[in-house]
Image (cartoon, rainbow, N blue to C red):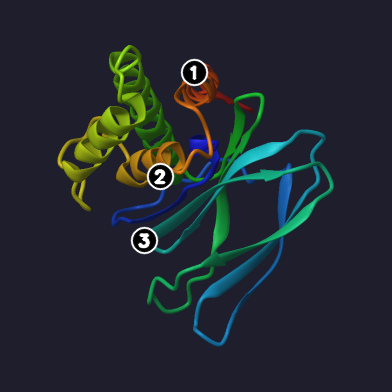
Amino acid sequence: MKPITLVVLLVFLSGGIAQSAPIAGVQLQSCEKNAEGEWIAHVVNVSHKEVETIAFFYGASEAAFNTTITPGETKDFTIGDSGEPNTTPAIGVVVYSDSTAEVADERTFQSVEQHRADSLLTLQQANTIIEKHKASTARIADTTKELEALAATQTQYRKTSGPTVQAPFLREMARELREGIISADDLAAENSKGIAHLEQKIVRLP
């Protein structure tokens, strides 16, 4: 399991839009609505670098996807409808695997950074729990119980402006441990790699 690459983040915000230079490394080829009224965005990575996050903004709404897009690859993204007239999605942020980023919309970039902080805190707390029960004779049972207990403390709505743990990540870790898909030690090792990556500050490209 790779928790930092599984989640789709959808955020609805209001306020003005602060825009920077347009995105050069990933192009939005087309965007149309499907039968359900959702936007389908077709993008292509024209850079020489691998993309790990792409975020769209449309009106007062944002949708960010943590997904790999290799150089030259095209990919489709399904984006909800904001309900605002005369609004179509545009690429607001692209984060590359080397922790550099192109930013066209400042508000969207703030949301991406918040999501990375949430992911970092989630992995850190999960590893604390895994280490806590390392010597337990019922290691998997004790670990999954505490992971799920931590997930249960989280609500749908953010209570603080600071980082918060992501309940779906925690539940997915617990499920994979319980089903024997991954060992506690291997999960901790994967989480540590994710932590090291997320601790790198994003460098904005000019």
Sequence-wise, the earlier of marks 2 and 1 is 2
Which quarter of the rendering shows the C terminus? top right
CA–CA distance between discs 2 and 3? 35 Å
Q: Is residue 89 above or below residue 206?
A: below
Which quarter of the rendering shows the N terminus? top right
Which residue is drawn at the image coordinates 39% and 60% (left, top)?
61
Verify CB contact (< 8 Å) between mark 2 and mark 1. no
Which residue is drawn at the image coordinates 55% and 20% (left, top)?
193
| Dot 2 alpha-carbon crowd within 10 angstroms: few under 14, some 14 to 19, many 20 or more | some
Q: Is residue 77 visible?
A: yes
Coordinates of residue 11 in the picture (x, y in percent): 36, 54
CA–CA distance between discs 3 and 1? 35 Å
Residue 192, label in figure = 1
Sequence-wise, the earlier of marks 2 and 3 is 3
| Dot 1 alpha-carbon crowd within 10 angstroms: few under 14, some 14 to 19, many 20 or more | some
Quickly name the residue at label 2.
175
Question: Helix, strand, or loop for circle 2?
Answer: helix
Coordinates of residue 71 in the picture (x, y in percent): 81, 41
Quickly name the residue at label 3.
60
| Dot 3 alpha-carbon crowd within 10 angstroms: few under 14, some 14 to 19, many 20 or more | some
Number of marks: 3
Which residue is drawn at the image coordinates 37% and 20% (left, top)?
127
- As shown in the figure, which amino acid type bears the numbered disc 2? Arg
